[in-house]
Amino acid sequence: MKKTFFSALMLLSCYTQSNAQEYYEKHLEFPPQATVEKKIDMASRLVPTPQQLEWQQMELTAFLHFGINTFTEREWGDGKEDPALFNPTGLDCEQWVRALKEGGFKMAVITAKHHDGFCLWPTKTTRHSVVSSPWKNGKGDVVRELRNACKKYGLKFGIYLSPWDRNAECYGQGDAYNRFFIEQLTELLTNYGEVHEVWFDGANGEGPNGKKQIYDWEAIERTIRRLQPKAVTAVMGDDVRWVGNEKGIGRKTEWSATVLTPGIYSRAIGQNKELGVFGKSKDLGSRDIVARAKELFWFPSEVDVSIRPGWFYHSKEDSHVKSLAHLADIYFKSVGYNSVLLLNIPPNKSGLIHENDCRRLKEFSTYLKNTFEKDYLKRGRTRWEALSGTSKEYMVRKDALVNTFMIQEDITKGQRVESFLLEGYWDGNWRTLAEGTTVGYKRLVRFTECQPEKIRLTIRSARNEAHILRTGLFYARPLTDNSAKVQLGNVPVSQWRLSGTDETMRKAFDKNVQTVWRTEGLKTFMVDLGRDAEITGFSYTPAQDDNLAGTIYKYRFEVSMDGSHWKTCATSGEFSNIMHNPVTCFVHFEQSYRGRFFRLVPLAEISGKPCTSIAEIGIFAVALPAKDDESAVYPVPGAPLTLKVGDAHPSVDGWSFFTAHEFLERDTRNGLPLGFIEHRGKHMSRDARVDNSRCSEVKNGVLQIRSIEEADSVDNRFGKRVKFSHGCYRTALPGSSEEWCNFTENMRIEVRFKRNAYEGFNDALWFMGNNNLPWPANGEIDLLENPKRKLNNRAHFTLHSENHYAGVVGGAGSVTSSIEIRDMSKWNIYWLEWYPDRIVGGVNGATYFEHKRGENGNTDWPWSDPKGFFMIFSTGISTNPKAWAGAVKPELWDNSAMPCMYIDWIRVYVNKQYKGAAAPAVKYY
């Protein structure tokens, strides 16, 4: 009997002891018929592996996005970049690591290869790497330099290797690429000592062959376990889980014991779909969802975010480093929410972490040290076991001002707390300070600052007995975010008008941003800015408030002056990383584009949804100088004419509207404008033939005057056969049936004009006297003349007369002046005013020429022609450098798009001293 009793006692003891010590490391499968209570009991005994625990205890780790994108200033490269761009002449990985160590970081993870396929180590798998760059004559190795720096300063070392490779020809070829990728991974895990974290993001786009790759994650995982058994695998691994956003924010209820099946397992898609969970799900471990699960994983979350708006370095972001207040808030919402913070700090083109980032990291470290070095709880480090409903009171140091509470579980015995209550006692009463759900490795709760005598922590609900490892009470100095808000655009929207867009969209206007637009399908978003702008970039923010808001992934961005003719801006054409980081994307052009209209053309939605959205869109533009800003003369220069005879000039005092020529199709004959005649002349046609019927037309309200290369030589009508024809107009003779305006004193003439960009091509807007004297006795005024041998950015003003003439573009005796114009291939308004005592000329809002009567002895012209003047438009083509116009580089001309000038309209104003006739009976608007 004694023997039987003793045996039973021993059996019971062994059973109790084995149950007390039975834990499931990293993974457990529930028995098929397990009850909810059984599942919760088993869940409470799921624990991390030693390397998972060590990873969790680091709390702060750093990402270093560095590569070819650093030099192109893109977020995603396309794999076509020239390796010669990579040349970080000042690279100092020790500077990186020192900055991280001073910031309190415990590990550095380097982007050994990003999606562009450029490798930061001398791999044997491809020439698209540092070996093909000028940096260290192709003998450099960024990975090794960082590894050595980490070893020197005591930081752990991790690698990121993008599975998506936009350079590798074998990408999308199944086994061939998997072998290629595993070979790269093997090099990194074999040649650089101990690797503590291997980071994959699962990126999977099209390759050079247009195919997507099916990754062999299980083979990849086996490679890591064989070569680096102590490393944790992140995101596309089974050790560390991505939190689901790139904002630096974890969940308030964050379970490390989670039902989410890691994506590397082939069963992941089916099981996660069955449970209705994914990486961004709010509930990954509650009792309800555990009750429906088949298995459970110790799969803690990592929160990744960049210290700057972008992941790679962009010089324009130097002033947009996250503020100390922002970083502190991120810490409380990541490490303080049972996660590890992976903060990206991107080195610059020199190969250094920018001083602004270094300064912020040091401030961040100092703030955390000052906050948590003084614990105001007495005996807060005491361990205690808590069943549901158990409370523990702590005495607080006298007169301590506090606002932050810390609680930690001993996760070597599982994550068990489901909810808790924190109370403070003063003035004879207990008051609620905070309530929370999960704890895990660490939970930080913030509350209104107070001076309690005691603190009481109640574990309201737990899975079996919770093991409280430590508590603490602190004061976190409140911080104010004084950093300037990231500007989403600098072109005010007050004049914006949606154009050609679905009017059923929701829309509203904020200060400099267009907000909110949604549409079914890939609909173009088009806006009239209301004025010309020199556009340098734009921002796009996708809508995020519901699952129906599609996100634009691939796009085309275009600008236009008239809303009909569009120019595509040079961009990457995709919003990189927007699926996982649906925040504002900034696109900065390498050059500026002049335009009044813009349109964003969606080409693909990120997930294939049948809709797209824009939460906010902003336009960046540089300020136009007055001479390049048409709106300095007219708010809407290209708008249809609304002036009536006698109306005051919209922006220039002292002038009233007289007449205009708008070059409308109805005011043409045989495609040529009424009110003008062909201007022939030997001086115009030494090496060309004036032929307006072939070389000009009125189209869409614009007079186009072209040059063409003839298929064979033609008679220039002056006894010479030539290879080129061009257009040349003059206003009709005064008194003729075609007359529309007689140019005289006390007039202001404005011409809206542009030209295409041909070097050495001379075009002109000019005036000559009507007195029929031989030239130059009748003189001329060149309102616009491009000096020969110059590209298209100078307007040259010349006044010639019989006694003041010295060459085609002025000289001794002639009156000349020039102005630099940003781009004459864009619309500008050129204007001329003449009075009895002076002539004034300019572009848009700027005067660049003024000549007073009698200056330089000039008294004979243009004040000596009682018949007034006629105006001439000429493309001025010539292949003879000594001839007028001097087109010195015809070999650069494109025969399918020859030199051309465009005249949108001419407007004439008079001042009160005007003595001429009333406005002509015939006007051409």
Image (tube, grey):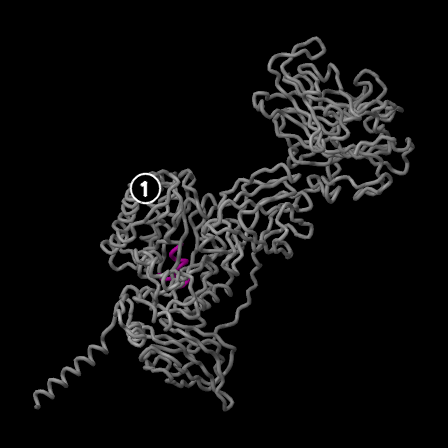
Between residue 529 and residue 32, name the one nearer to us.
32
Secondary structure, magenta segment, majority class? helix
- Residue visible at 61% across and 46% down? 526
Is residue 102 located in the magenta-colored stretch of the structure?
A: yes
Quadrant housing the N terminus: bottom left
The quarter of the displayed image where residue 49 is located: bottom left
Quadrant housing the C terminus: top right
* Residue 328 place in picture, x, y as percent: 47, 66
Instruction: Give, as a three-letter code, the residue at label 1.
Output: Gln
Which residue lies under the disc numbered 1?
173
The magenta-colored residue range is: 96-106
Question: Taking 290 as reference, is 194 above or below it?
Answer: above
Question: Taking 170 as reference, is 47 above or below it?
Answer: below
The quarter of the displayed image where residue 780 is located: top right
Q: Does residue 120 appear left or right of residue 576 in this picture?
A: left
Between residue 612 and residue 822, name the one nearer to us.
612
* Residue 922 place in picture, x, y as percent: 85, 30
